[in-house]
Image (tube, rainbow, N blue to C red):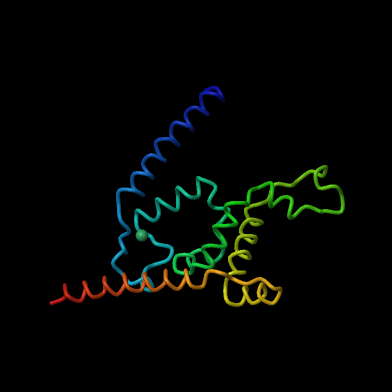
Amino acid sequence: MSVHGRDHDIEQSMGVLLTALRDIATRNDCAYDNDPPDERPRPCPCARCVARQALDVTDGGWRFVGARVYRMETNARERKIVAAWRKLGDDRMLAQILADATSDIDKVHLEPPTPRDWYVATSVIQWLATNVGSSILNEAGWAYQEYDADRAEREKREKTTKKSIDATDKDTP
Ligand SMILES: [Zn+2]
């Protein structure tokens, strides 16, 4: 088979797989939706969540998966800082950050970042939003502005969880 024919075949198979994944990811609810957030398995092994993770990975989203990615589900600060990083960060930017800057950065050959580079960068950026990490930012003069919004989000989530627990209690004879 020609290289061109093989590329075409791979592209077609990928198309079929992505369609199937999108279907699974959008048509189903998480199998653990009714469990309290603390008791849900992480990462979630249900079909919908696995399909979402797979889609994210094929989309380049693996770059923004750090060591404690599961914490973003319940921690607004960590989710927001990684979301902001994801908006700006790309291979070129991380390559520039890691490049030896003793020479003119526009003229040096930029090594593309490795998956490990991305893992470390994203893990550290997420960590900066933790209590310990943000104490470094505070020490240097940064001040977080969204405590109120985060608290409102947390209270809303706790209410929903309580509702679903109450509903489960009622179901139990
Ligand atoms: Zn799930």
Residue in view at x 26 percent, y 72 percent:
163
- Expressed as whole percent of the image width and height from the top left, the position of residue 173 reads 12, 77
Q: Is residue 110 above or below residue 70?
A: above
| Above or below, 172 relative to 79 | below
Q: Quadrant of residue 29?
A: bottom left
Of residue 27 and residue 16, the one placed in the foreground of this image is 27
Image quadrant assignment for residue 161: bottom left
Give coordinates of residue 30: x percent, y percent: 33, 59
Q: Is residue 47 left or right of residue 3?
A: left
Q: Of residues 102 and 48, which is closer to you in this image? A: 102
Percent across and percent down for residue 165 are: 26, 74
**Which residue is most to the right?**
103
Q: In the displayed structure, does residue 111 sit left or right of residue 71?
A: right
Q: Residue at x 62, y 72 (%)?
A: 143
Observer-nearest of 39 and 162 = 162
Whether residue 25 sits left or right of residue 11 in the image: it is left
As drawn, the residue found furthest toward the left would be: 173
Residue at image location 38% in from the left, 39% down from the top: 19
Quadrant housing residue 137:
bottom right
- Number of numbered markers: 0
Q: Which image quadrant shows ligand 1? A: bottom left
Indicate whether 25 appears above or below 139: above
Q: What residue is rendered at 23% in x and 75% in y? A: 166
Name the spot of residue 135 as percent of width and height, x first.
Answer: 64, 77
> Relative to residue 8, is residue 120 drawn left or right?
right
